[in-house]
Amino acid sequence: MENVTSKPLAITELPKGVPGSEALQLATVDLNNSQRPFIIVGNGVIRQDAVMEVQALIEQLGAPVATSFMAKGVLPKDHPQNFYTFGFMEKDYVLRGFEEADLLLVIGFDQVEKLPSEWNKKKVPVIHLAATAAEVDEFYPVKKELVGNLKETLPLFLANNVKPKPWLPSERLKSRIEESYSIVEKATTGSALTIEKILHVLEKVQTEETIVISDVGSHKVAMARTYQPRHAKQLIMSNGFASMGISIPGAIGGKLAAPDKTVICITGDGGALMNFAELETAKRLGVSFVIIVLNDSMLKLEVDTMKKKFGDSFGVTFSNPDFVKLAESFGVKGMEAASVDEFEAMLTEAMNSKGEIVLIDTMVQND
């Protein structure tokens, strides 16, 4: 570590502007006139520190809510209005709720995560709340637009006599989502490791002080479907452009930013090998975190995509090094788990290891 003479760049705060009273009133009228509004929450709510404000609006409205990948945790897992996450390439069951709605209340959503043409095919009218103007097209038909700082705008909107609009999508949609996304934990004692079982253990042992950083790959999709953080800001995901290999360097940054938190990164074996050398950086900086490597000797997302399109895959399976020995060569403690019980014990031990980087190599069984 060396001293530098350069000065850090100044941070420009987001403007605290809010929509005018007339715009707020007209949007409230449209919302109150709707019968089945569906609330969509994006990462702008977290970035503008407006989680409590959006929760207050959600409680008042009583309508169903879904979040983008990067806004997970805005509602707790057991909240009755929580219809979990949307934005998947397939089996995106939340969209059935969107299709039953007569209005989408879209708050802080960044289209880099998923274009509206993929999730609003029925062109349901939109009320747009965000710090920036809407990108309007036929699949994002903005009825009213409220542009301003969300932390300041949401209380003003709520104060305009927003009427409760409780409703539920048909056909027990919430229960079907929970089953399809493996959100409800099933018995796992003594069983082989799958990504869903690993995520249930991770969800079980997480604390109020845990930050989880997901790499990119098929496990990121599982994280978005299955894993439920307790609060916002407890799960960091790279979505949109989705940079594979983010988790280990991301864990370094996470620990530097929040040294008192327990940081856990979860990565596929391909993503881990892309940036494994950053363990030297982590050791040199003296940071500590837990690494979970999902070891199946393939780029599973690419394998699945190729098989669906061509019936077979090519060039996306490989042989792995011994991750435990590789970790130890960097001065990092390594362990190998082959069952759910082993993994839970190792993860609990790793989370209690103060000032130490711990790698857990998990022998994942694919379906």
Image (cartoon, rainbow, N blue to C red):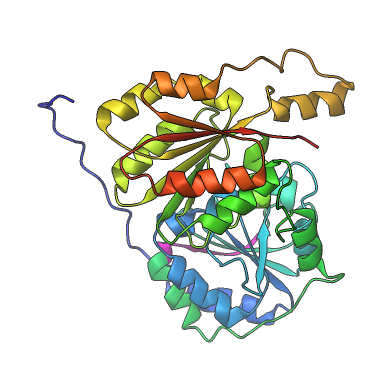
Answer whether residue 301 is magenta in the image.
Answer: no
Answer whether residue 144 is magenta in the image.
Answer: yes
Instruction: Classify residue 7 as left or right of residue 241.
Output: left
Locate residue 284, reporting x and y percent. Answer: 27, 26
All told, the count of numbered labels is 0
Report whether residue 200 is seen.
yes
Q: Residue at point 32% right, 62% down?
A: 16
Instruction: Classify residue 179 as left or right of residue 112.
Output: right
Q: Which quadrant of the rendered structure holds the C terminus?
A: top right
Main secondary structure along the magenta-highlighted residues: strand
Compared with 26, 276 (above or below) is above
Residue 40 found in image quarter:
bottom right
Q: Which quadrant of the rendered structure holds the N terminus?
A: top left
The residue lying toward the viewer, choosing from 155 and 259, is 259
Report whether residue 114 is seen.
no
The residue lying toward the viewer, choosing from 53 and 131, is 53
Locate residue 57, reporting x and y percent. Answer: 53, 76
Residue 179 found in image quarter:
bottom right
The residue lying toward the viewer, choosing from 130 and 172, is 172
Query: Magenta span covers which residues?
Result: 142-150
The residue lying toward the viewer, choosing from 164 and 339, is 339
Instruction: Classify residue 334 as left or right of residue 88.
Output: left
Q: Residue at point 43% right, 48% down?
A: 351
Compared with 135, 141 (above or below) is below
Locate residue 87, reporting x and y percent. Answer: 68, 48
Compared with 41, 322 (above or below) is above
> Most extreme residue toward the right, as rendered?
311
Locate residue 180, reporting x and y percent. Answer: 79, 54
Residue 176 found in image quarter:
bottom right
